[in-house]
């Protein structure tokens, strides 16, 4: 049986995404601690033994080892296969959207960096600026180079720069407005940096759709948590007792911004067309 080139590339994109998903687990675990993501090699945090290459196969190794370290039998978090599976799905989705092209690798950086940012913020309520800076640099340089050589690219330099300032500007305005009017933080500056970075990759239109989707979905989750009486508060120890946000119900917003940006990247035009048709139908 002869396997077509399309099938080979599809399989390769899945394995490529899963492999980088495995690396994302290292990033997610080490970056919040200020540790290197390349040294030392992967090892069990309990017994310290290095993980052999045959025990580091994305998804499969976790299943074969039944979620435990081969040496000390300490449980391995289910986070690892989940992130690897997500990486595999995103690798496939990017291939179906962009084929094998420069755009594929450009948005590969965006998607996988975004997953890392979302998970770290969800887990620690912190936005690691080294990741944001690296992604922003790539997000700006690529459209700039294609503009210089005058070759069409998925996003123009104008859209990218406009998206950067619009994304950062909107969140900055919300932060300053709430601080002045209500004397409290509605969002964090990390949210502004992330939405500005998102704007570089998906432009001004993408920023607006992302913010709308993120706010909508965060509101739904927040209301759901209130209904089931599950309260999530800002976990920082340095929040002062007289700070209005102290003990207020809150959610980290970066995960919703990342999800919203992914929804725009893969379904943007369909979402916009559906919304416009919906508005026409009710007017």
Image (cartoon, helix red, strand yellow):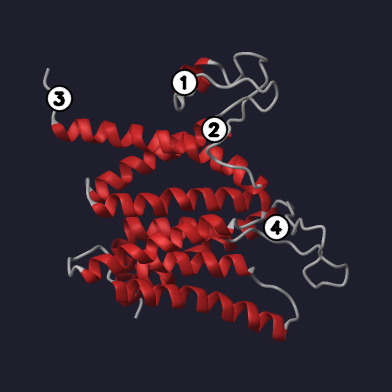
Horizontal and vertical percent position of residue 63: 50, 20
Please tell me which of labels 4 and 2 falls first in the chain: 2
Horizontal and vertical percent position of residue 268: 33, 62
Q: Residues within 10 Å of mark 4 (few under 14, many from 20)?
A: few
Q: CA distance from mark 3 to mark 1?
A: 28 Å
The residue tagged with tag 4: helix, strand or loop? Answer: helix
Q: Residue at x 54, y 53 (%)?
A: 117
Q: Is residue 83 left or right of residue 104?
A: right
Q: Residue furthest left?
A: 2
The residue tagged with tag 3: helix, strand or loop? Answer: loop
Is 123 drawn above or below residue 190 in the view shown?
above
Residue holding disc 2: 80
Q: CA distance from mark 2 to mark 1?
A: 15 Å
Q: Quadrant of the N terminus?
A: top left
Is 116 drawn above or below residue 73 in the view shown?
below
Residue holding disc 1: 53
Q: Residues within 10 Å of mark 3 (few under 14, many from 20)?
A: few
Q: Hey, which quadrant is residue 278 in on the image?
A: bottom left
Q: CA distance from mark 4 to mark 2?
A: 30 Å
Q: Hey, which quadrant is residue 157 in on the image?
A: bottom left
Checking the image for residue 226, the label placed there is 4
Q: Residue at x 60, y 78 (%)?
A: 174
Residue holding disc 3: 3
Q: Residue at x 55, y 41 (%)?
A: 37
Q: CA distance from mark 4 to mark 3?
A: 52 Å
The residue tagged with tag 2: helix, strand or loop? Answer: helix
Q: CA distance from mark 2 to mark 3?
A: 31 Å
């Amino acid at each position: 049986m002869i396997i077509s080139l399309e099938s080979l590339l599809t399989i390769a994109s899945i394995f490529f995404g899963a492999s980088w998903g495995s690396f994302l687990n290292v990033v997610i675990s080490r970056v919040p601690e200020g540790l290197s993501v390349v040294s030392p090699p992967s090892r069990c945090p309990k017994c310290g033994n290095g993980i052999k290459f045959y025990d580091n196969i994305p998804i499969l190794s976790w299943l074969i080892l039944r979620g435990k370290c081969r040496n000390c039998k300490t449980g391995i978090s289910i986070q690892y296969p989940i992130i690897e599976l997500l990486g595999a799905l995103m690798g496939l989705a990017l291939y179906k959207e962009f084929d094998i092209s420069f755009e594929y690798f450009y948005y590969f950086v965006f998607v996988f960096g975004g997953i890392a940012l979302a998970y770290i913020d969800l887990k620690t309520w912190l936005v690691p600026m080294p990741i944001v800076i690296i992604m922003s640099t790539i997000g700006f340089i690529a459209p700039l180079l294609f503009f210089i050589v005058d070759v069409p690219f998925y996003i123009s330099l104008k859209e990218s720069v406009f998206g950067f300032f619009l994304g950062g500007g909107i969140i900055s305005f919300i932060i300053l407005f709430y601080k002045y009017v209500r004397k409290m933080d509605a969002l964090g500056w990390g949210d502004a940096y992330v939405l500005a970075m998102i704007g570089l990759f998906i432009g001004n239109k993408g920023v607006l759709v992302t913010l709308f989707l993120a706010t909508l979905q965060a509101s739904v989750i927040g209301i759901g948590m209130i209904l089931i009486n599950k309260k999530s508060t800002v976990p920082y120890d340095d929040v002062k007792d007289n700070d209005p946000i102290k003990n207020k119900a809150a959610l980290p917003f970066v995960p919703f911004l990342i999800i919203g940006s992914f929804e725009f990247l893969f379904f943007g035009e369909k979402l916009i067309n559906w919304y416009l048709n919906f508005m026409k139908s009710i007017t």
